[in-house]
Image (cartoon, rainbow, N blue to C red):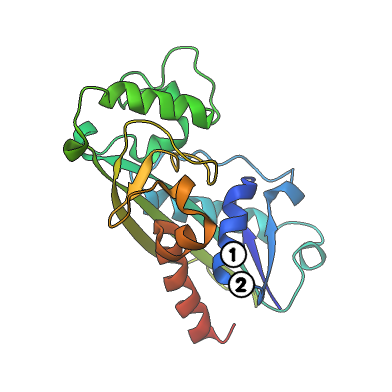
Amino acid sequence: MTTLLIATRNRHKVGEIAAILGERFRYLDLSGFQEAPAIVEDEPTFAKNAAKKARELAKWLQNLPAFDFRVPGANALVLADDSGLEVDALNGAPGVHSARFAALAGSAGSVARGAPKGNSPDADNNAKLLRLLKDLPLERRAARFRCAIAAIRMKPRQPSLAGQVFEGVCEGRIQAAPKGQGGFGYDPLFVPLGHNQSFAELGHQTKNRISHRAQALQKLRRYLDTLGL
């Protein structure tokens, strides 16, 4: 069984990836590697952030004692995901800052003075987005979720850390109020194109078929098929 080590501690994200890729893989995440270094996501695009996270985690793993024991199997890859929301009326914000949007000064840009370095609570991010869009009609609330997933093969051992990046986009709009109990992040606000319900209302099966992450993972799965994994 091929092991996929996912560069996140977000259990929701790991669950989505496992649901889409299926049971043919073994899934690990950083909750089992507490000593892994924190990686600053300071690149201007999702693709570059995902590639940076995968590359730096792979470098660290190369020198990890008992690597073969802690990452079992004859085949193993590091996966790093960076994803977020782009709103046209906000000139593409929150973009790569989606997870810490509430800590930003204004609708994008620098981090507000005294703001924590980690991610902001989902409720705070959603509340800020709604405040910024409160005077806009629904027809001016076009938005999209974008996802980039970087993959670097660790087993068999590779001479370099060159990897592949797979991207997906889901178009939609931001509704006037959060609805639904499922999902995470901006899911209660985002209504995908062709639907009248938010990701949080549509449920996992529908989301995992049409989402930005699903599209990127489908491309990754085809790549893994070519490797015979």
Report x, y in % for residue 30: 68, 49
Could you tell whether 81 is left or right of 193 in the image? right
Task: Give how far across and how far down residue 112 sits, in percent.
Answer: 41, 16
Q: How many marks?
A: 2
In the displayed structure, would residue 96 be above or below residue 217?
above
Residue 228 lies left or right of residue 147; in this view the side is: right
* Residue 145 position (above or below residue 127): below
Most extreme residue toward the top is: 113
Q: Secondary structure at mark 2?
A: loop
Q: Quadrant of the C terminus?
A: bottom right
Q: Are marks 2 and 1 in contact (CB under 8 Å)?
A: yes
For image coordinates 19% across by 31% down, the residue present is: 137
Q: Which residue is mark 1?
A: 19
Is the residue 21 above or below the residue 89 in the image? Answer: below
Q: Secondary structure at mark 1?
A: helix
Q: Is residue 213 visible?
A: yes
**Observer-nearest residue: 74 or 26?**
26
Q: Which residue is mark 2?
A: 22
- The answer to whether residue 78 is visible is no
User: What amino acid type should be assigned to the residue bearing mark 1?
Assistant: Ala
Q: Residue at x 40, y 62 (%)?
A: 210
Query: Residue 197 at x, y = what percent?
Result: 38, 48
- Marker disc for residue 183: none
Q: Residues within 10 Å of mark 2 (few under 14, many from 20)?
A: few
Residue at point 45% right, 71% down?
A: 218
Going by the numbered disc 2, the residue's amino acid type is: Gly
In this rendering, the answer to whether 193 lies above or below 177 is below
- Assign the N terminus to one quadrant of the image: bottom right
Closer to the camera, 15 or 190? 190
